[in-house]
Image (tube, rainbow, N blue to C red):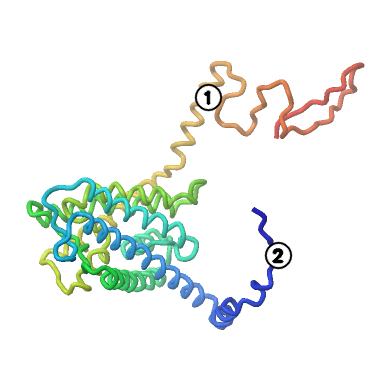
Amino acid sequence: MNINKSPTVVYRVDPLKHAFRNVFEVLPEGVRDHVVAAIGEFLGTFCYFFFTFAGGESAAASISRVNDLVSTEPSGPNPALLLYIATSGAFALAVNAWIFFPVSGGLFNPLISFGMALIGAITWARCALLIAIQTAASIAGAYVVYALFNGGLHVETTLRNDTSPAQGVVIEMLLTAQVILAVFMLASEKHKASFIAPIGIGSAYFISQLVGIEWTGASLNPIRSLAPYIVNRSFTHYHWIYWAGPFTGTILAVVIYKLVKALEYETAQEEGKRDETAQGEEKGDKYPALPTPNRRPSSALPSIHSVDVPSAEPKKAGEDMPVCYAV
């Protein structure tokens, strides 16, 4: 598809663009950065929670209806319902994190913001701002779902009857640690796969949902549990576990991350590559597979990345082929 890269008439006279630019240009640079991050995080968090809550409502509505109201009390365990909820939540996280990562970081969770501040990825001022924005956006998303779906909002996180609060805390702790550690290692660390970090983070969230929904509702996020309770104006007596469990999970993830960073985990793979290179040289392999900076092409034909290197010695008669080395 041919896309005109030069500014079009619409682009040059776009009134919204100029209006927004005039508003933000008057702000100091530091304040402007916080405002942009706050707007991006609100939009991303709202979209994430809207689709997560709406997915839960749709899953419940597909089970049964009583007097045109959604019934969220299935007769027994339903793997299809579990898979539906986990999939909708994981995709909502991955897609919106991918969209808003360049704007605000796409965190959507106060404890991820807290953890990122603990490891030094964001400042404490940015952390406090994001937590306030995320909380407001989650409640807004819950109210919109409540208003749009006639059945109300039935996406509260609850313990199963045979699950104790202590068990719930540990389950939430482990599942939260898994997701936040994925954020640290895939998004906070700089590597070649950083641009697809949302896929890994969404996958970590997906498996955590599969494990936890049946037992605790798999909150992994305090405001994920708080928003429906505020909208429905009802709190369970064990609501505290959805704060204690994810909080301790965040601390656990931070400790693990700092441990592997202190051990300089990057050098472990480099050591393995050096060992493989040494073994290849001992076996007489002139061009071992790793490392590759000085490898020569195995083909006798010059590659497309070859360059001509003039020889200091005079050519013999009939010798017209230049010496070629791969770059």
Q: Nearer the viewer, residue 317 or 21?
A: 21
Q: Residue furthest front?
A: 67
- Residue 39 percent location from the top left of the image: 44, 72
**In the picture provided, is 86 more to the left or to the right than 266?**
left
Circle nearer the N terminus (1, 2): 2
Q: Residue at x 67, y 26 (%)?
A: 297
Q: Which residue is mark 2?
A: 6
Q: Which residue is mark 1?
A: 278
**In the picture provided, is 26 more to the left or to the right than 257?**
right
Q: Residue at x 23, y 55 (%)?
A: 62
Q: Which amino acid, by three-letter code, is at mark 1?
A: Ala
Q: Residue furthest left?
A: 162
Kindly indicate the quadrant of the structure image that contains residue 136: bottom left
- Badge 1, how many Cα within 10 Å: few under 14, some, many 20+? some
Q: Which amino acid, by three-letter code, is at mark 2?
A: Ser
Q: Residue at x 38, y 65 (%)?
A: 47
Distance between the alpha carbons at the discs numbered 1 and 2: 53 Å
Q: Nearer the viewer, residue 271 or 2?
A: 2
Disc 2 on helix, strand or loop?
A: loop
Q: Residue at x 64, y 53 (%)?
A: 1
Disc 1 on helix, strand or loop?
A: helix
**Residue 131 vertical placement versus 59 (above, below):** below
| The C terminus: image quadrant | top right
**In the picture provided, is 228 more to the left or to the right than 274?**
left
